[in-house]
Image (cartoon, grey):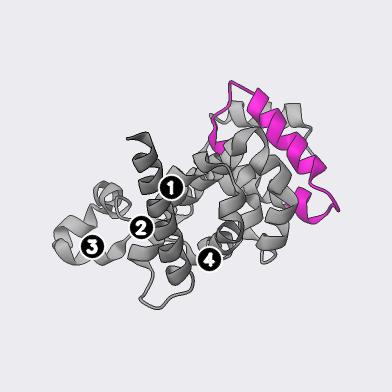
Amino acid sequence: MLSIEELFTYLQELDEPFGLYRTVQLLGLVLLENSKTADAWIQLVEQFEQASKLSSRWRQALLTAPLVSPRSSELLDKAEPLLIADNARRLIELLVAVRTLEVMPNFSLKSLFTEAELKSSDRLMPLFMSDPIPRWSVWQPFMGWLLKRINDLPTNVRPETVKLMEIWQVKSPTGSIYRKEIGEIAIAWLEEKQAEDRRDW
């Protein structure tokens, strides 16, 4: 098995191909699943954070590692101390990664194009990804984990959380799990903000 230094060198030598994203993600998953604690995973995340020459995508791959397991809620609990440390900065990074990476192209937009235009789908892919569909197998357990503790987290996670909640409300079918909870949280936050604004008058 490669040492951390060899892994960093290997990624740089290959010009950090995005195709290895899932490989690094699975490495993080193995570290979390095969240990009673998250110590080895935490150490690897911190080492990637210190490797300033490497793209941030590898850190994102490690942070999203718990999400690709059927035991994701359990693994997120294990990872939580690192995620909420330093004013939850890594949790915020995880929220961004979920919103931007754990999504699928919206191919329902295909109906807007001719057969000839679809043959040049490489040029259309950015459009399909401009209105992406959540990867529900990842989003559902993550949203369940997040919503259970959202009011105990620092308020600076709210802007990114709101973006995920908005996507959930728009893309999930009416009556889907968490829609009611998300609506209640949104109303509570709005009322809280209005109360703060009144105090500032």
As measured in the structure, the alpha-carbon distance from the residue carrying label 4 to the one carrying label 2 is 18 Å
Q: Helix, strand, or loop for circle 1?
A: helix
Q: Which amino acid does label 1 sit on?
A: Thr
In the displayed structure, 10 sits above or below 38; it is above
| Secondary structure mostly taken by the magenta-highlighted segment of the chain | helix
Q: Which of 173 and 156 is in front in this view?
A: 156
Q: Which of label 1 and label 3 is nearer to you?
A: 1
In the displayed structure, 127 sits above or below 113; it is above
Q: Which amino acid does label 3 sit on?
A: Leu
As measured in the structure, the alpha-carbon distance from the residue carrying label 1 to the one carrying label 3 is 18 Å
The C terminus - image quarter? top left
Q: Which residue is drawn at 60% across and 21% down?
A: 52
Q: Name the residue under label 4.
A: 140
Q: What residue type is labelled 2?
A: Pro
Q: Name the residue under label 1.
A: 100
In the displayed structure, 185 sits above or below 18; it is below
- Disc 4 or 2, which lies upstream in sequence? 2
Q: Name the residue under label 2.
A: 105
As measured in the structure, the alpha-carbon distance from the residue carrying label 1 to the one carrying label 2 is 11 Å
Res. 20 visible in picture = no
